[in-house]
């Protein structure tokens, strides 16, 4: 019963480094989302995907890129990390038939 | 656009009742979620309201008034483990686009005191 799996769980980057966060779901969900959460704030949408091969920008997309080459995977890339990208990143997926979201356990990223 | 407001912090005593309010202004509304989030963890689902009225689920109840753009989460018989952040989130209608991405409030940090 894996659900949504995010890797890595923790990461420390230096300013200017790049990295990719992986989100994998085994529920055959069409929709996938990347959110970030900063202290004392709710989740804000970075990018989302409505199906394999499609991506779209959310509320706070700057500095991030995404890809969904396979239906089960949604990758979030940071091309040149900045301290402002220090945050907790949550991935979520949803079936096209329902409203229920399944969240991953999060990736805590620190950029120094 | 969407605007969702909820109080930043609330404090209550173990065994008491607490009501967490959420007001929203949005175009294309389908329903409203409540999530519980403990520190360092992912949000976990509590309730989803589509119709007006109160839905009860054990110690937790959630209310929605679509005409007023208002919801509340009611927690009864508070326990220490209920100390967490409570997030309300708007689920848009299909007319807003097929992605129907959730928009979250900033969360209400509830502290339960012994």
Image (tube, helix red, strand yellow):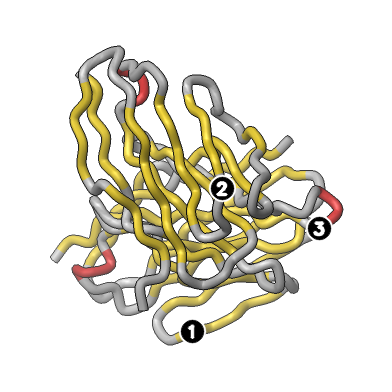
What percent of the width, then of the height, locates residue A47? 57, 38
Within 10 Å of disc 2 (Cα), the crowding (few <14, some 14-19, many 20+) is: some
The residue mark sitting in front, 1 or 2, is: 2
Occupied quadrant, residue B55: bottom right
Within 10 Å of disc 1 (Cα), the crowding (few <14, some 14-19, many 20+) is: few
Q: Do marks 3 and 2 share a chain?
A: no
**Residue A69: mark:** 2
Question: Residue drawn at (68%, 52%), measured in percent from left and top?
Answer: A50
In the rendered view, does A52 fall on the left or right side of B20? right
Secondary structure found at label 2: loop
What percent of the width, then of the height, locates residue A82? 33, 16
Occupied quadrant, residue A67: top right
Question: Residue drawn at (34%, 51%), measured in percent from left and top?
Answer: B10
The residue carrying mark 1 is B57
Q: Which chain is indicated by disc 3?
A: B
Lower position in the chain sequence, tag 1 or tag 3 = 1
Which residue occupies the foreground of this view, A1 or A38? A1
């Amino acid at each position: 019963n894996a659900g949504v799996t995010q890797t890595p769980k923790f990461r420390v980057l230096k300013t200017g480094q790049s990295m990719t966060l992986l989100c994998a779901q085994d529920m055959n969900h069409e929709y996938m989302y990347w959110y970030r959460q900063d202290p004392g704030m709710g989740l804000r949408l970075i990018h989302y995907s409505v199906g394999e091969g499609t991506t779209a920008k959310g509320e706070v997309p700057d500095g991030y890129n995404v890809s969904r080459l396979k239906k089960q995977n949604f990758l979030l890339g940071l091309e040149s990390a900045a301290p402002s990208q220090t945050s907790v990143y949550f991935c979520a997926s949803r079936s096209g038939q329902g409203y229920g979201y399944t969240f991953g356990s999060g990736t805590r990223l620190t950029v120094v | 656009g969407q605007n969702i407001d909820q109080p930043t912090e609330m404090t209550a005593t173990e065994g008491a009742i607490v009501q967490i309010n959420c007001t929203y202004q949005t175009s294309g509304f389908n329903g409203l979620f409540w999530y519980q989030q403990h520190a360092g963890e992912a949000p976990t689902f509590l309730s989803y309201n589509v119709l007006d009225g109160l839905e009860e689920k054990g110690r937790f109840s959630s209310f929605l008034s679509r005409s007023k753009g208002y919801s509340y989460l009611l927690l009864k018989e508070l326990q220490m483990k209920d100390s967490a952040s409570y997030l309300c989130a708007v689920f848009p209608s299909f007319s807003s686009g097929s992605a129907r991405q959730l928009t979250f409030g900033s969360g209400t940090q509830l502290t339960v005191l012994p």
